[in-house]
Image (cartoon, rainbow, N blue to C red):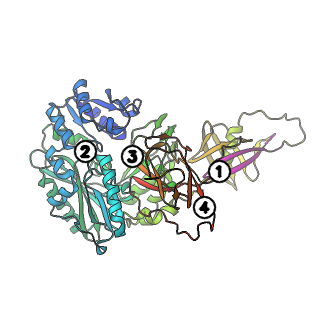
């Protein structure tokens, strides 16, 4: 009987496992890096053990330190969560060798499926050995790991070697294994997966399908169960292939078999030998706790009878601290408030007042809705997200709401290319035009005004705000009857609530302020000073860091005085598990270079200056466009010049 579990993970993953352990009466131990010293998962566990350092390679990927932490804290079992060491066979062996219970599949099963190439061989599938024009497009893919790291779509044969080298380097950095392989890239396919659960007595349960087709950079954004629109024949084939994969490696515990589905054909991708991020939709539909089942299986219990029956439909949305309109750039800062209303499930690793840093994945929370039908579940989830209170860094909340309400999603016609087709329309700013007025009126509440004895009307007061990248000026007056604004009747105004009457329709705004940042409902504004100080001026062609992070690479041979072409990659920043490639804004010469590998930079740090070549100075120049294809971990960014 397991009495104490060390959770070898962080964030919402660790919090989710701690919750179930608490319900089972099992004591929990958290591990944390220095950056996570005050993180929620370290606070909610019964005990926490420090892993010195901040980088994952020095902390959460140090299996030796985690085993020592388990032994020192008196834990008798280790749950790896999902990500980090969850699919590391050597770590599983080290846990077992230390006399601890491993809550996961046998190391041999992890090893067999950890390499996607070996997994395909087990399923009788051969990777592409020689790629020709007729094979294009193809996908270069890391043999180890997941989450889209080390993955590149190649559409031109001339790009294959370069993309393969880049994928190798990224895979080696992320997983310690630089092996990559090439497979056909299925255009317009759906990402469908099957949840399996197996015990040590030979029983394998199939717990339905999930559709995870809405992805950015090959990483899932919205998932649902069951996968809609599959025929009974195709569903049966997927189930059979999943059981075949599990039995081929004598699998034990929870695992996921992933496919790309095009028409009535299923293409095997891989088997994830761990719990998936999207497992809550399966839990909602089948009414079970997969973490609890993992623990029972690890204790040697048999799965009793047939799997539970599926009921209804569930949809999950991943709430990220990122800006989809700026190439999914991750965001950092203080999360002042996070509250999601309605009868939905919220899995998160953050609470009010926590800081979102640069070291780890930008996932804030997962929001899950369950209902009798798909349409009801989608409606419930969209409404909960729309009404959510999120005060802090920019998130993808609006994108999620629009995606859920998009015609293609409503009709279950989405595929993995959804955001390639629709991202521009889904990220058009749509701020409330009355939000600046509500902010100004809330700010004016309680301020002194000129005496009521004056016969002359007071001069209008003005406030300036930045909203959705634009500046807005608001005018209002103090009168004997209170605050007034042209064309709008102010029904009520105080520091936290403003009610406006616009053409007979009442609009209610809850207002919160944190320094110069103001939140009016779901709209974020920045209060601007009445007389702004002169801003720091940068030379034309200056490249400023778009986010805090680390310079991990500078283009080979790039020095001051070097000639560059428009769109040419100059340097790479890494933040929140993603690399961001920064390119030259114009053809010209690098007149200043301040970036160096390993340098930590903040938002707005001057990285380099490219002096554009005057028109006609070099004759006609062909400008190289930035690459079109981007993967989960690298975005191309031509920064605006100042």
Tell me where the magenta segment starts and ends, as one range: 459-480
Find residue 613 and name its label.
4
Residue 443, by quadrant, is top right
Q: Earlier in the sequence, mark 1 or mark 4?
A: 1
The local crowd at label 3, few if under 14, some if 14 to 19, many if 20 or more residues have their Cα within 10 Å, is: some
Position of residue 86 measured from the top left corner of the image (x, y, whole percent): 25, 43
* Farthest residue, direction left: 201
For disc 2, the marked residue is: 290
Can you tell which of label 1 and label 3 is closer to the viewer?
Answer: 3
Q: Position of residue 212 (x, y in %)?
A: 34, 57
Q: Is residue 60 visible?
A: yes
User: Would residue 460 be counted in the magenta stretch?
Assistant: yes
Label 1: element kind? strand
Whichever of callouts 1 and 3 sits on the residue coming sooner in the sequence is: 1
In the image, which is nearer the foreground, mark 4 or mark 2? 4
Residue 157: name its quadrant. bottom left
Residue 554 screen position, x and y as percent: 45, 49
User: Where is mark 1, residue-wise?
Assistant: 506
Mark positioned earlier in the residue sequence (4 or 3): 3
Q: Residues within 10 Å of mark 4 (few under 14, many from 20)?
A: some
Q: Earlier in the sequence, mark 4 or mark 2?
A: 2
Secondary structure mainly formed by the magenta segment: strand
Question: As rendered, which of 159 and 634 lies closer to the eye?
Answer: 159
Question: What is the spatial separation of the Cα atoms under label 3 and label 2, in whole angstroms?
Answer: 27 Å
Q: CA distance from mark 4 to mark 3?
A: 35 Å
Q: Secondary structure at mark 2?
A: helix
Q: Residue at x 69, y 50 (%)?
A: 472
Say the numbered circle drawn on residue 577. Answer: 3
Residue 539 included in the magenta stretch of the image: no
Q: Which of the image's four quarters has the N terminus?
A: top left
Disc 1 vs disc 2: which is toward the camera? 2
Q: Nearer the viewer, mark 1 or mark 4?
A: 4
């Amino acid at each position: 009987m397991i009495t104490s579990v060390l959770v070898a993970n962080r964030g919402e993953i660790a919090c989710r496992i701690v919750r179930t352990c608490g319900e089972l009466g099992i004591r929990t131990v958290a591990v944390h890096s220095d950056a996570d010293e005050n993180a929620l998962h370290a606070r909610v566990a019964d005990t926490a053990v420090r892993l010195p350092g901040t980088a994952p390679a020095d902390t959460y990927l140090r299996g030796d330190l985690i085993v020592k932490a388990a032994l020192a804290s008196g834990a008798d079992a280790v749950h790896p969560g999902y990500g980090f060491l969850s699919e590391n066979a050597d770590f599983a062996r080290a846990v077992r060798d230390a006399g601890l219970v491993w809550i996961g599949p046998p190391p041999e099963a992890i090893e067999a499926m950890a390499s996607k190439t070996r997994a395909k061989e087990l399923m009788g599938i051969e990777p592409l050995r020689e790629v020709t024009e007729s094979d294009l497009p193809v996908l270069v893919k890391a043999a180890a790991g997941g989450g889209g790291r080390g993955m590149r779509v190649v559409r031109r044969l001339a790009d294959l070697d370069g993309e393969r080298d880049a994928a190798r380097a990224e895979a080696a950095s992320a997983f310690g294994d630089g092996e990559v392989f090439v497979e056909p890239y299925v255009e317009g396919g759906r990402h469908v997966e099957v949840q399996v659960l197996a015990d040590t007595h030979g029983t394998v349960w199939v717990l339905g399908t999930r559709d995870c087709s809405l992805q950015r950079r090959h990483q899932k954004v919205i998932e649902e169960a069951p996968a809609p629109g599959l025929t009974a024949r195709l569903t049966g084939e997927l189930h059979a292939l999943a059981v075949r994969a599990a039995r081929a490696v004598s699998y034990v515990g929870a695992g996921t078999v992933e496919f790309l589905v095009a028409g009535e054909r299923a293409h095997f991708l891989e088997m994830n030998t761990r719990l998936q991020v999207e497992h809550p939709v399966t839990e909602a539909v089948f009414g079970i706790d997969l973490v609890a089942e993992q623990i029972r299986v690890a204790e040697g219990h048999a799965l009793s009878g047939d799997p539970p029956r599926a009921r209804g439909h569930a949809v999950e949305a991943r709430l990220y601290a990122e800006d989809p309109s700026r190439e999914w750039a991750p965001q950092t800062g203080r999360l002042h408030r996070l509250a999601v209303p309605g009868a939905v499930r919220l899995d998160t690793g953050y609470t009010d007042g926590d800081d979102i840093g640069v070291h780890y994945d930008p996932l804030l929370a997962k929001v899950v809705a369950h209902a009798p039908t798909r349409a009801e579940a989608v409606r419930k989830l969209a409404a909960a997200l729309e009404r959510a209170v999120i005060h802090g860094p920019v998130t993808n909340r609006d994108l999620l709401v629009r995606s859920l309400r998009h015609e293609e999603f409503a009709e279950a016609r989405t595929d993995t290319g959804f955001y390639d087709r629709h991202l521009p329309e889904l990220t058009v700013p749509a701020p409330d035009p009355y939000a600046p007025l509500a902010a100004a009126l809330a700010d004016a509440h309680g301020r002194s005004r000129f005496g009521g004895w004056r016969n002359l009307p007071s001069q209008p007061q003005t406030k300036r705000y930045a909203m959705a990248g634009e500046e807005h000026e608001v005018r209002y007056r103090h009168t004997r009857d209170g605050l007034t604004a042209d064309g709008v009747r102010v029904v009520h105004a105080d520091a936290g609530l403003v009610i406006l009457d616009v053409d007979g329709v009442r609009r209610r705004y809850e207002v919160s302020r944190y320094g110069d940042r103001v939140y009016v409902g779901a709209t974020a504004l920045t209060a601007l000073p009445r007389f702004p100080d002169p801003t720091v001026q940068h030379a034309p062609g200056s490249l400023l860091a778009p986010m805090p992070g680390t310079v991990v690479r500078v283009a080979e041979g790039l020095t001051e005085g070097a000639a560059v072409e428009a769109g040419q990659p100059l340097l790479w920043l890494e933040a929140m598990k993603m690399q961001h490639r920064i390119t030259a804004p114009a053809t010209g010469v690098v007149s200043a270079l301040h970036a160096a590998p390993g340098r930590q930079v903040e938002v707005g740090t001057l990285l380099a200056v490219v002096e554009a070549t005057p028109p006609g100075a070099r004759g006609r120049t062909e400008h190289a466009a930035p690459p079109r294809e981007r993967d989960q971990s690298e975005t191309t960014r031509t920064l605006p010049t100042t």
